[in-house]
Amino acid sequence: MAGNEPVLSPDQLKPTNRRKARIGAVSAIVILLLMTIGNHKGNTENYFMYGLAGLIVVVLVGDWVLRRNGLRD
């Protein structure tokens, strides 16, 4: 470590508020699904957005299951 680097405790390295992160993830899902409604002709964009929304849902459900079983704090 360099002499000028601050020393951080583990409490200072915690991630942001988990509730806000979940709200942000649900908001992202809603926005992705709303973007499929538009004036484009092909469905490639729709499939991409459905896939991203589904991936976020899988991450949220996985996080919920791990927390429910006490495997994650």
Image: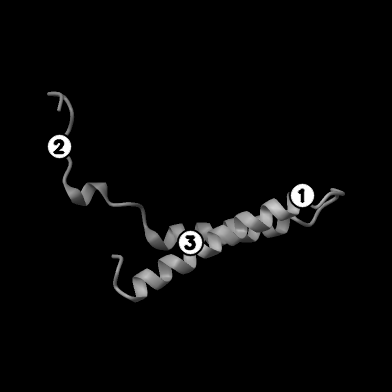
Mark 1 or mark 3, which has the lower sequence index?
A: 1
User: How many other residues sit within 10 Å of disc 2, few (<14), some (14-19) or many (≥20)?
Assistant: few
Element assignment for label 3: helix
The mark found on residue 68 in the picture is none
Residue with the mark numbered 2: 7
Q: Which numbered marker is on residue 44?
A: 1
Q: Residue at x 29, y 73 (%)?
A: 70
Give the alpha-carbon distance from disc 2 to disc 1, as whole Å.
49 Å
- Color theme of the render: one colour
> Relative to the observer, which residue lies in front, 31 or 51?
51
- Check disc 2 and give the amino acid type: Val
Residue 17: horizontal and vertical position, in percent?
Answer: 37, 57
Q: Residue at x 74, y 49 (%)?
A: 45
Amino acid on which disc 1 is placed = Thr
Residue 34 vs residue 53, the one in the foreground = 53
The x and y percentages for residue 44 are 76, 49
Image side of residue 66 versus residue 37, left or right:
left
Tell me the amino acid under the disc marked 3.
Val
Relative vertical location of residue 48 with respect to residue 60 in this rendering, above or below: above
Q: Which mark is residue 59?
A: 3
Residue at (15% x, 24% y) in the render? 2
Badge 3 crowding class, 10 Å Cα cut-off, few under 14, some 14 to 19, many 20 or more, is: few
How far apart in space, not on screen, are marks 1 and 3 (Cα)?
A: 23 Å
- Horizontal side of 44 relative to 21 (left or right) equals right
Query: Of callouts 2 and 1, which one flags the residue occurring earlier in the amino acid sequence?
Result: 2
Q: Quadrant of residue 62?
A: bottom left
Viewer-side label of 2, 3 = 3
